[in-house]
Every structure is written in structure tokens, then in C-alpha cells.
Amino acid sequence: MKQFLLLSFALILSVFSFGQCNDLFISEYFHGYGNNRALEIYNPTATTVDLSQYQLVRYSNGGTTPNAVGLSNKLDPEECWVVVSDKRDPAGTGLDTMVDPALQALADTFVCPVYSINKMMYFNGNDAITLEKISDGTYVDIIGKVGEDPGTAWTADTANGFTSAGGARWWTRRATLIRKYDIQDGVTTNPPYFNPAAEWDSLAVMTMDHLRWHNNLCHPSGLNPIEKKNDCFFYPNPSSTGFFLVKGTEIIKSVEVVNVVGQMVITEQNPVQRGEMKIFTNNLENGIYMVNVNFADGSSVTKKVIIK
């Protein structure tokens, strides 16, 4: 009798577990200020997955017309893939304002640089986002509800159908959402309603410290953050203004400017301990220089600047 009960329990557990941890899902949703947009895809399976078989899709403002963008690369088990809006021009303004350098440094790929060509990464809080199979368009995961316009954003307001009609706190606009630890699969059918609190934890807008890793029940010991990549950007570049700004993804400790023959022509410490510095170039001749940016965490980046 005991063996029969154990066998029955094993069969029930097997049936209950079937279908879990068997496909990709969206593990993080990042809607920040300006053009700061990111989506993180997680592989909970035990095998490497070909991302080229998938696409991210945006359904705008309750519409059902897809705006899709394909993916690429291979995603190993327990790994994440971070997709960021392709706005990297430091001179960009308005709709082309640059994505925060800290977010850029966490990206695995950039997509949708031009709104008129592909609108997928321009989601604004009331757009349904899906991860779909390219072959047949089947849903692999859904954020929101396709065909529903919740107003400004989806909320946790049960009385108003999880819309923003009652003035409840926004969950999908100006916020970061992280998939709960015990969620092992994506939403594969368009839901009757979308309650973000059911499967997501909500963090403050512009929270980035969970991107590139995801702790999940499919791999309980898989808390494996990927090493952060620091980066920096110069503006203007080329510079004809007598200075250029250095903006980094980490606190900048010092900046060194080296000419084409290897001579250090500028070396400056950062007195304010921030992620930016202003380097004056009035005494430099026109030409190409290499700039070494040294960060407070011990890392460094070398890039080229042109002085005119």
C-alpha cells in the first residue's frame, strides 16, 4: 500500500511538473524616463535556446496590430538576454534622447533605432508586450492583455479591472517589474485580465541592479549575476568647443588624454566623485587622442576623441 501511494504521488508530481521550465519567458520589464526601455528574457530550461526562433511584439493602446522585432544569438540555461532601446547618440534630443549609459552598459542587444521603421521598443505603459514564436506566432509570454487599453497603465486595482481608471498606482509605466521567483513559465494565452501583482514584483523607476540575472525556482541555486560592463561616452565628439564631457556608467576616478605618439597630455582627477567630468582641451592641437577613463571600482575604458 505504501509503495502504491508513493507511486501515485510520483505520478501526480510528474503531471504537475510537466510543462514547467520548458520555454523562455520575460523576466524583467523596464520602463524608465525618456527613451529608457529594456526587456530581459530568461532561459529556465536545461538546454541552450536559439533566440532567432523568437520575436518581441508590441500591441499599442489596446490594438491588435503587431509591431515585431526579431532576436538573435544563443541563450544558455539560466542565462538572461537584455534588449534595450537603440538610442545611443549623445547628441540626441526629444524622441532621440540618449538612453542612460548605465542601461546601455547592461544591454546584450539594441533594437528599434528609428520609430518610423519599428515601434516595438517604444512601449509606454498601456501597450501589451509579447514574446512569440516566429514560426507560427504562438504566444510564449505576455505582459498586459492584447486588445485592452488600460488607460495610462495597468495597475493592481481589482475594482477597476486592473486599469488606471480609478487613479491607482501605475505598475507598467515609470516602473521596473521583476518576475516572481516561483513563476516557471510565461503566459501563453491572452488573459481575461492582467493583474501585474500576481506574477511580478514592482520596483522603483530606473532600478537597474537586477538586469542580466534572474533568480528562479527552475534553478534554485542559479543566482548568478553577470559581470557588469562599465562604459563611457564623450560629448561633443568631435569637439571644437574647447572641452568635451565624459559621462560614465560608474563613478569616474580620473581621466588621462594621450596623443598619437603615446605622450600623456592631460591627466585629471575627479574632485566631485560623480559619473561625469569636463575635460578642457584649449591647449591641445587638432587631431586624434586616446582617452583613458578610470573608474572608482578599479575598471577602466579607453576610447578615441577627435579635437578640431
Image: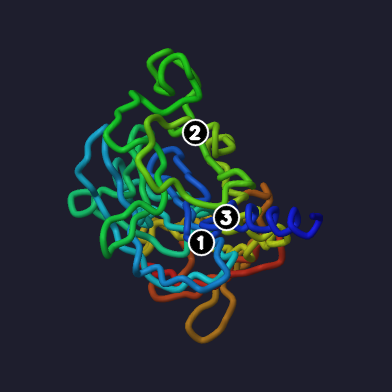
Mark 2 or mark 3: name the one nearer the start of the chain.
Answer: 3
Residue at x 56%, y 73% (from the top left corner) = 265
| Lower sequence index among marks 1 and 2 | 1
Q: Which mark is residue 22?
A: 1
Looking at the image, the residue that sits furthest to the right is 2
| Numbered tag placed on residue 15 in the rendering | 3
Q: Is residue 251 visible?
A: no
Q: Where is residue 180 shown, x and y percent of the image?
A: 60, 43
Residue nearer the viewer, 282 or 288: 288
Foreground residue among 96 and 290: 96
Density class for disc 2 (Cα within 10 Å; few <14, some 14-19, many ≥20) is many
Q: Position of residue 58 (x, y in %)?
A: 30, 46
Query: The C terminus appears in which quarter of the rendering?
Result: bottom left
User: Residue 211, percent across and down?
Assistant: 56, 53
Q: Earlier in the sequence, mark 1 or mark 3?
A: 3
Q: Secondary structure at mark 2?
A: helix
Residue type of the residue flagged with mark 1? Asn
How far across and down, in percent of the image, does residue 239 sit? 38, 61
What is the distance, in whole Å, between disc 2 and disc 3 at their CAs? 27 Å
Q: Is residue 217 left or right of residue 173?
A: right
Mark seen at residue 196: 2
The CA span between labels 1 and 2 is 22 Å
Q: CA distance from mark 1 to mark 3?
A: 14 Å
- Foreground of the two, 121 or 133: 133
